């Protein structure tokens, strides 16, 4: 049995259903990220697991125990919120120990737990400071420490880095990853930031409209998206997509679009090939510039925009009459107005059913 199991859960407010029949199993020690746009239901699912929202139907199990109707304090979880929620008049040490003191944990045990959490999160020099004397990243580390001292097996994070600037987000993201590697507890993390999801997660649950679209490893989600939504949501710039049709011709399969005809016989179809409308997707970094090597499809387009990004650049051109982006090395000599030859490997592309959006 997994560390956390959500079984056919439904959550709603009055007559409005947020999600229905939602299920997922999380193994012990996994780092799971719930990823999706605002309003997709990811925080609602986290709050249901935490016990902050009642479920209309279904069950929630944590470490082999049905906790569906247990109070949050009895579920064996530690939670870190988007806001730090620290007590302003208490020192860092008192903030860390407050919950344990309220629970009447023995003083020696409190001291031991606070010392351990403080060492893990590098808070030792800050223990006597008040929250007002800390940076945003330090405050969030204290909030994480307050959850850690509970000595629970499951930690829940609700967009903990969204209030920080970009540099602090990067630094604290690394700290959270190190923390998970060191303590090995189950962690469920909510975010709308795909960089956080791809770098932190063992598995990502991509959500849209309160439905899990794909639940898989970051590598699987990025390279084999289950549908057009996942393909477009993951990746920056987004995957290039071209609407066209599949047809069997000349002893193989071809994808045809206005001004484009590609041999897709080498594409690894997961479902049965059938003639009809389809959408071809190619990641910007999977497009090469220059003359096409063997078994790659060659194309050409005029450069309309070049976006320098330091170590790399994003080049805007066109493919089959649609705007397309290509990632190139930052020192590549490309200018607006150039006629740019480029090419891509069909075996690394993605193909989707035009009607359902599902991966072929």
Image (cartoon, rainbow, N blue to C red):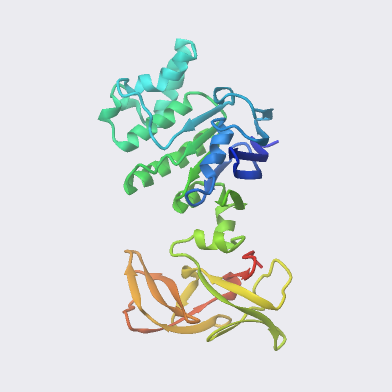
Q: Is residue 149 left or right of residue 311?
A: right
Residue 95 appears anywhere in the view: yes
- Quarter placement of the C terminus: bottom right
Q: Residue at x 58, y 41 (%)?
A: 30
Relative vertical location of residue 285 with respect to residue 334 in this rendering, above or below: above
Where's the N terminus, which quadrant? top right
Q: Quadrant of residue 280?
A: bottom right
Q: Which residue appears at 68% of the width and 82% of the height?
A: 247
Residue 348 spot, x, y in % from top left: 57, 70
The answer to whether residue 291 is visible is no
Q: Position of residue 333 (x, y in %)?
A: 32, 77
Q: Quadrant location of residue 224?
A: bottom right
Q: Is residue 159 shown left or right of residue 304?
A: right
What residue is rendered at 54% in x and 31% in y?
Answer: 52
Q: Nearer the viewer, residue 11 or 110?
A: 11
Q: Is residue 213 left or right of residue 176?
A: right
Q: Is residue 31 above or below residue 320?
A: above
Q: Position of residue 215 (x, y in %)?
A: 61, 51
Q: Residue 217 appears at what percent x and percent y?
A: 58, 52
Placement of 229 over or under 202, stated as above or below: below
Q: How many marks?
A: 0
Q: Is residue 231 above or below residue 134?
A: below
Residue placed furthest toward the front = 15
- Residue at point 54% right, 38% down? 46
Q: Is residue 331 left or right of residue 236?
A: left
Q: Furthest residue to the bottom?
A: 250
């Amino acid at each position: 049995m997994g560390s956390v199991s959500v079984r056919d859960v439904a959550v709603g407010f009055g007559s409005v259903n947020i999600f229905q029949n939602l299920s997922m199993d999380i193994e012990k020690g996994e780092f799971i990220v719930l990823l999706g746009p605002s309003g997709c239901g990811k925080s609602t699912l986290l709050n249901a697991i935490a016990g902050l929202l009642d479920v209309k139907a279904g069950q929630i199990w944590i470490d082999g125990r049905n906790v569906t109707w247990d109070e949050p304090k009895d579920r064996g979880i530690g939670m870190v919120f988007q806001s730090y929620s620290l007590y302003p008049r208490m020192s860092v040490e008192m903030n860390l120990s407050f919950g344990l003191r309220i629970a009447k944990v023995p003083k020696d045990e409190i001291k031991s737990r606070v010392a351990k959490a403080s060492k893990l999160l590098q808070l030792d020099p800050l223990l006597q400071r008040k929250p007002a004397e800390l940076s945003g990243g330090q405050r969030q580390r204290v909030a994480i420490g307050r959850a850690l001292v509970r000595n629970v097996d499951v930690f829940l994070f609700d967009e903990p880095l969204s209030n920080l600037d970009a540099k602090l987000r990067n630094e604290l993201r690394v700290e959270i990853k190190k923390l998970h590697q060191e303590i090995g507890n189950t962690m469920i993390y909510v975010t709308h930031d795909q960089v956080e999801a791809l770098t932190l997660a063992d598995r990502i649950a991509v959500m849209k409209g309160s439905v899990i679209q794909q639940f898989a490893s970051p590598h699987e989600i990025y390279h084999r998206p289950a549908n057009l939504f996942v393909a477009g949501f993951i990746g920056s710039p987004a995957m290039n997509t071209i609407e066209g049709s599949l047809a069997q011709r000349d002893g193989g399969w071809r994808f045809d679009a206005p001004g484009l005809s590609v041999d897709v016989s080498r594409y690894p179809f997961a479902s049965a090939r059938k003639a009809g409308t389809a959408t071809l997707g190619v990641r910007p970094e999977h497009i090469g510039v220059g003359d096409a090597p063997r078994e790659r499809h060659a194309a050409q387009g005029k450069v309309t925009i070049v976006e320098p990004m330091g170590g790399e650049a994003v080049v805007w051109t066109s493919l089959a009459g649609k705007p397309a982006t290509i990632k190139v090395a930052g020192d590549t000599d490309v200018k607006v107005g150039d006629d740019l030859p480029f090419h891509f490997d069909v075996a690394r592309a993605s193909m989707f059913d035009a009607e359902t959006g599902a991966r072929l």
